[in-house]
Image: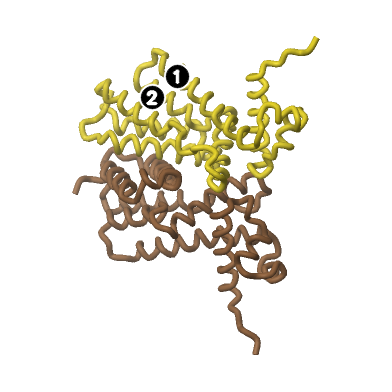
Chain colours: A brown, B yellow
Amino acid sequence: MPKIVDHEERKKRIAEATWRVILNQGMEGATVRNIANEAGLSLGALRHYFSSQNDLFVYAMELVKERATIRINEIVLSDLPPKDKILNILLELLPINEETKAEMEVWFSFVFYVRHKEDIFDVKNDGIFIGMNKLIDYLDQHQMLRANVDKEMESERLYALIDGLALHALLEPMRVDKEQLMKVLTYHLEGICIGT
Amino acid sequence: MPKIVDHEERKKRIAEATWRVILNQGMEGATVRNIANEAGLSLGALRHYFSSQNDLFVYAMELVKERATIRINEIVLSDLPPKDKILNILLELLPINEETKAEMEVWFSFVFYVRHKEDIFDVKNDGIFIGMNKLIDYLDQHQMLRANVDKEMESERLYALIDGLALHALLEPMRVDKEQLMKVLTYHLEGICIGT
């Protein structure tokens, strides 16, 4: 009897192999051949799932987004107090554990790789800016923002702060560790929220 | 009579050719052969100046740092009022014109390329974090910081804000344009400085 392999499951495993290759060898090592090797598949088998390297990259990056989105939605639906909820959502966007570290390393490598290719993937649209707008709106709806706060500016600032911190935590994991990230985020939120 | 070519001048021109190749083709296109082509030199002539690709990359990146440092030092020595001085220094670290755009695009591409190579260049040490500490100290020495400000946190936050904004200005130049960058920086500085 032929083994039944779940198509989506197999695609996910190939995407994960892609992440590992990017992590270990950088984008220039992420050839279809290397990825097939890492996934334990023949080149032909991999081509059955992804007809081109671009298709594979787009899928692998969408999967990074999807996983982060799932984790964030769980926090959104939790019954944490508003400020803790915000803090925990922001932490999901930072490299604080092996999973998020890998995701962000791959994401940044990909973003600067893809800029010199045809327009295969809209890297701008990672959804984080829209997310930051929603978080600031959420604080506003809960009457938590200070009176002098400009919401548009706060969204832009929070977005830059998060991506800057993510970058620095990847480059200097010893100095910018989880504790430091939490300290900076808490400090920032206290600066824009009414004191509790 | 043989033409006298200034050695340092020639090295700088090769470094600039390296930047152009990285800008147009990404790191994976930045082979010694392509760079020699772009610089209008033979492979042998290029090797006369740089014995390896790594030597060339290190020099090309040091030159990015050197140029930014020179521009910033000019502002430091100017007689602008303190807040304007800070704002202008920060703007030098953002992609607001063709020169700084190219510098930062090359810098980010390089940072994520070099992480998967041997330790050829200490990308963490771009000097910007130390610079941010100095800026916050400068504001403090001029009694311009608000009473509730934590200097360590402000240095970390400003550092993240600057690199996050630089990243977003590269990825979304239409939305995050020079005007928006100045607005966010001014807003941020007003938040930490005593009102004027």
Q: Which residue is mark 2?
A: B86
**What is the chain letter for disc 1?**
B
- Residue furthest to the bottom: A1
Depth check, front residue: A82 or B142: B142
Residue A152 seen anywhere in this rendered image of the structure: no
**What is the chain letter for disc 2?**
B
Asked if the residue at tag 2 contacts the one at tag 1, i.e. Cβ–Cβ closer than 8 Å, the answer is no
Q: Is residue A10 above or below residue B182?
A: below
**Given this view, does label 1 or label 2 mark the residue nearer the observer?**
1
The structure residue drawn at horizontal position 33% and vertical position 56%, both measured from the top left corner, is A88
Spot occupied by residue B177 in the image (x, y as percentages of width and height): 51, 34
**Residue type beneath disc 1:** Asn
Q: Is residue A130 above or below residue B32?
A: below
Spot occupied by residue B136 in the image (x, y as percentages of width and height): 32, 29
Crowd around label 2: few <14 · some 14–19 · many ≥20 (10 Å): many
Q: Is residue A175 left or right of residue A4?
A: left
**Residue type beneath disc 2:** Ile
Q: Is residue B33 left or right of residue B84?
A: right
Residue B84 seen anywhere in this rendered image of the structure: yes
- Residue furthest to the left: A196
The structure residue drawn at horizontal position 52% and vertical position 42%, both measured from the top left corner, is B119
Q: Which mark is residue B73?
A: 1
Task: Assign a secondary structure to mark 2.
Answer: helix
The structure residue drawn at horizontal position 50% and vertical position 25%, both measured from the top left corner, is B68
Q: Is residue A189 left or right of residue A21?
A: left
Earlier residue among tags 1 and 2: 1
Crowd around label 1: few <14 · some 14–19 · many ≥20 (10 Å): few
Which quadrant of the view contains residue A146?
Answer: top left
Spot occupied by residue B79 in the image (x, y as percentages of width and height): 39, 12
Location of the N terminus of chain B (image quadrant)? top right
Depth check, front residue: A154 or B38: B38
Task: Assign a secondary structure to mark 1.
Answer: helix
